[in-house]
Amino acid sequence: MEIKKTSLNKLHQDSQAKFVEFAGYEMPIQYSKGVIEEHKFTRSHAGIFDVSHMGQLFIYGNENLTSDLEKIFPLDLKNLQQNCSKYSFLMNEEAGIYDDLIITKLEDGYLIILNAACKEKDFEILSNILSKKYQMELSNDRALVAIQGPKAVEILNETISDVEKLTFMTGDWFDYNGQKLFVTRSGYTGEDGFEISILNDLAEEFTKSLIKKGAELIGLGARDTLRLEAGLCLYGHELDLNKTPVEANLKWAISKERLSNGGFVGSDKIINQIKEGAKQIRVGIKPEGRLIAREKTKIFNETELPIGEITSGTFGPSINGPIAMGYVDKEFSKIDTKILLEVRGKKHPANICKLPFYKKSYVKGAN
Amino acid sequence: MSEVKFSKEHEWISLEGDVATIGITQHATEMLGDIVFAELPEKGSNVEKDGTAGVVESTKAASDVYTPVSGEVVDINEAIVDDPAKINEDPEGTAWFFKLKMKDISELDSLMNKEEYDKFAKESSS
């Protein structure tokens, strides 16, 4: 199959990007500055991320659509206000996760942002459950550009006036050169920032205008170190069909209103797991010293019995040390529990620690 | 100091008497990206030509470091363990990895000179 390119591909090339294939797309892993500088620039200024490979699914409908989506997502969508966003999951009956996503209520339906590698399958699953009652559109004509970091609001507000009025996890339509953009105040770096859904034809010019104002392009390499420092899950690593939201320590994303009556796909398993407790749970891990423990590294307790596995591990540039996330047996999940990580045949000491590794405060609204 | 030689695994080596200094090339660091971890062989240990003698890790992945010649490890550069970013800054100078007392100087013969290595590096990265 031919590799797909986003509408910013030429701009990446012109900016000396190193490319990798990711979910069938040719995507920039880093630019000439490298992962660490790009990471730090995002934390101190503003980074631009091309996330156009992600799925933008528009579903149009009224209250019936809201009721039908509540049979799928563990959210209180009836009481969700227009233009507000929620983090959620698409699950199977066993509460295994097909995908994690952000869903936003629009005037005439919903916008769901899906992972690139999952979007086609998600579309199929959702069309089947909704039995084609609603108009669904997995957009091919829109790019998705994120701007993240402490300078993001100032820079974006110069390009699109009034975006500063958005609060964390809300969105709205804005005018840009006579076209409609949908902007949400959200992101996946642990920084304040925005994601902008924009027509492909306008994406390059729009992105260049952000660069002119001082933002810089950031690759997927730094996106990964940023999200890991922020303790955020990445599908295919922390999350997959063999993990439930309870095991992933994402109970907070399930609306309390939905836990009493259930009625969504996977609800029996979720309600049961919350009552009984999950066998394994996602935790933050800090190796001692500088050792990096990568995905699939085996985790042992102090008496060298296996208790779990790392799902993501890297060097955290803002932490200036190694960080990881993984799953361990519940009894070893307490903060400050001493564990051992087997790397290249040797067991190295590490500690269970609090997530996120790195924290900034978001611009919260009344909700 | 003798002419610097290069291996296909992207190490450089320079000889002074029978002691060889070994590190990784500029080209290797460019391919790896930001280096955030380095592990070196133990002082006093013996390493065999083409065997692993250390590890470097970038933000992305871990890579073995091989020794292009055999010998006894007589010195290691602790500075790059404490601050692995030094490897990106000066890979073919102050950020050397280890020094070996060579067993067999003729092992150098099979290695590349600068011109041959540059050509090899260019071809292997394209």
Image: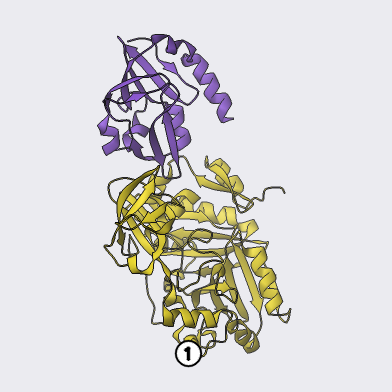
Chain colours: A yellow, B purple
* Residue in view at x 26 percent, y 33 percent: B79
Q: Position of residue A158 (x, y in %)?
A: 45, 62
* Residue in view at x 59 percent, y 30 percent: B126
Q: What's under tag 1, amino acid-wise? A: Ser
Judging from the image, mark 1 belongs to the subunit labelled A
Depth order, front residue of A159/B51? B51
Q: Quadrant of the C terminus of chain A?
A: bottom left
Q: Position of residue A71 (x, y in %)?
A: 60, 84
Q: Is residue A219 visible?
A: no
Q: Judge left or right: residue A152 versus residue A303.
A: right
Q: Judge left or right: residue B78 versus residue A164.
A: left
Residue B33 against residue A5 in the figure, above or below: above
Q: Judge left or right: residue A24 versus residue A236.
A: right
Q: Position of residue B10 (x, y in %)?
A: 46, 26
Corner quadrant of residue A266: bottom right
Q: Mark 1, residues whose alpha carbon is within 10 Å: few (<14), some, or many (≥20)?
A: few
Residue A254 against residue B47 in the figure, above or below: below
Depth order, front residue of A250/A175? A250
Depth order, front residue of B16/A209? B16
- In this rendering, the count of numbered labels is 1
* Residue in view at x 54 percent, y 19 percent: B119
Label 1 sits on a secondary structure element that is helix
Residue at which label 1 appears: A260
Q: Position of residue A191 (x, y in %)?
A: 39, 62
Depth order, front residue of A259/A318? A259
| Residue at the far bottom in the pictured view | A261
Q: Is residue B9 visible?
A: yes
Corner quadrant of residue A229: bottom left
